[in-house]
Image (tube, rainbow, N blue to C red):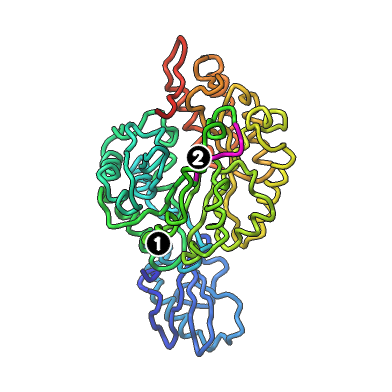
Amino acid sequence: MSARLGPLAEGAAIAGARITAIAWRGDAAHLTLEVAGATVDLVLAATAVPPGPFRGLPALTYRPTALPFAQFAAAGAAVAAALAPHWPGCLARDWRDALAGLGDDVDAALPLGEVLPAAAAARVACVAPWTRLEYGQRAQYGPCCADFQAAPALGHGPPLSLWRSAAMRGFRRALASAPPPSTCRTDCPRLAARSDTLASIVLRGGPPAYRANQRAVIEAILAGDDDPATTPLELVCSATRSCNYDCLMCSHGATGTLADELPVEFYQGLAPILPGLGALEVLGGEPLASPVLRRVLAGPILRGAPQLEVALTTNGSYLTADALDRFRSVRLGHVTVSLNAATAATYQRVNRGLPWARIRANTAALLAAHHARRSPRAITYSMVILRANLDEIEAFAALAAADGVAVRYMLPIGDRNRQSFLGEPALVRAVAAALARVAADLRARGRVVEAARVDGEVAVLGALPRGGRLPVLPGPP
């Protein structure tokens, strides 16, 4: 998987020099040459303004270096001669070259949509069956939340056995064929918004095995392969159903228990898929209520996979500055904080947990920890829209914008504590209008992925039956 630029490849010798790296930064390609024991970085841009010193290709120049120009002039001229017949077309990267060009740098990333033709990127309505394996509640599994599967698969087993199962193959066949997929509920907002297409995948650097798995996954999606020789790029599990909150819309705080806590053997059993795994997303209940998970995050089990990011969906109560320091040996990736409110009063009414001031102190610690990293990962504030908070939909987006984080909305599942608004057409219309305004603002600020997902919720609301009382989305069986 050596990176290439036109006819040149990493490792190739040219005019007494060796090409040690090819990478892209923005619209320009960078070639690192090793010359006489030193290195020089050549830069090929899409335009020749200002022109560089190599007559054969004025768009090729070099970054400042202590190496005298005379020592690499011949190699630069040879590179120019080799690339001139292919410029500027060679800057239109093949996605495979782009992936290889990210190299071993685990912080290097590139949206696949930037290097994949638009027609190919939109070919499959949802890529989750090829990228993601989720262990759900009650022995359910699949590529996504069981609430949006038409008939959730049931079964136990290690990741690879479920990954190759008949149920997962059925999801891949359904999503590779003409819509609508029989495996998916029509009220899935991601399917409605087509927010999980190939264009949504982010290529990431990392060890060769991880990059090879990404390539194999993308090739399988493009081919519609229902039984690829790949491993998941993402794995989702619930650490425990126990929760220290009693949110209006969720029963975990009232009924959850540590009796179902995932044992340490589960995390140890991920070893066969760790080389190709980019994200381990842990849910709950409250995932950090699990003592086992807290020990895993502070211990050595996950350290052998430098590319692995641990993602959490959490109420934030355990994310103190001290806890974040204990977890520093793992790459804490995307953290979704279930705030469900934009004000202290609504937060207390909906989440019924720690005081707002303490949670905001924890979100501040989380923001500080992310910004302290060389390449900070994303944070999302999440709101389940309820009767008790629907008047704060736009204020919630403003809170997320002020903190510089992403925003997510979810429709209620079931009608716990009579909090679903889906039975009242007037409220449905008001929520849809508020969400549409949020989506427009997100799009205006360039946050198109978030906007697309909010669009998905609006589309689901718009597809509900017209007139009379509207049904609530069914809860778990």
| Residue 19 locus on image (x, y percent) | 44, 79
Q: Secondary structure under badge 2?
A: loop
Q: Within the image, what quadrant is residue 370 found in? A: bottom right
User: Which mark is in front, 2 or 1?
Assistant: 2
Question: Would you say 276 lies left or right of 58 here?
Answer: left
In depth, the one of 395 and 151 nearer the eye is 151
- Amino acid type of the residue tagged 1 in the rendering: Ala
Q: Is residue 41 above or below residue 474?
A: below
Q: Dot 1: within a 10 Å radius of its alpha carbon, few (fewer than 14), some, or many (20 or more) residues?
A: some
Q: Secondary structure under badge 1?
A: helix
- Which residue range is magenta in the image? 240-246
In depth, the one of 290 and 431 nearer the eye is 290
Main SS class of the magenta portion in the image? loop
Q: Dot 2: within a 10 Å radius of its alpha carbon, few (fewer than 14), some, or many (20 or more) residues?
A: many
Identify the residue shown where x is 66% and y is 56%. 369
Q: Is residue 69 above or below residue 123?
A: below
Task: Measure the alpha-carbon separation of dots 2 and 1.
Answer: 24 Å
> Which quadrant holds the C terminus?
top left
| Residue 45 locus on image (x, y percent) | 50, 65
Q: Who comes first in sequence, dot 2 or dot 1?
A: 2
Question: Would you say 441 lies left or right of 93 here?
Answer: right
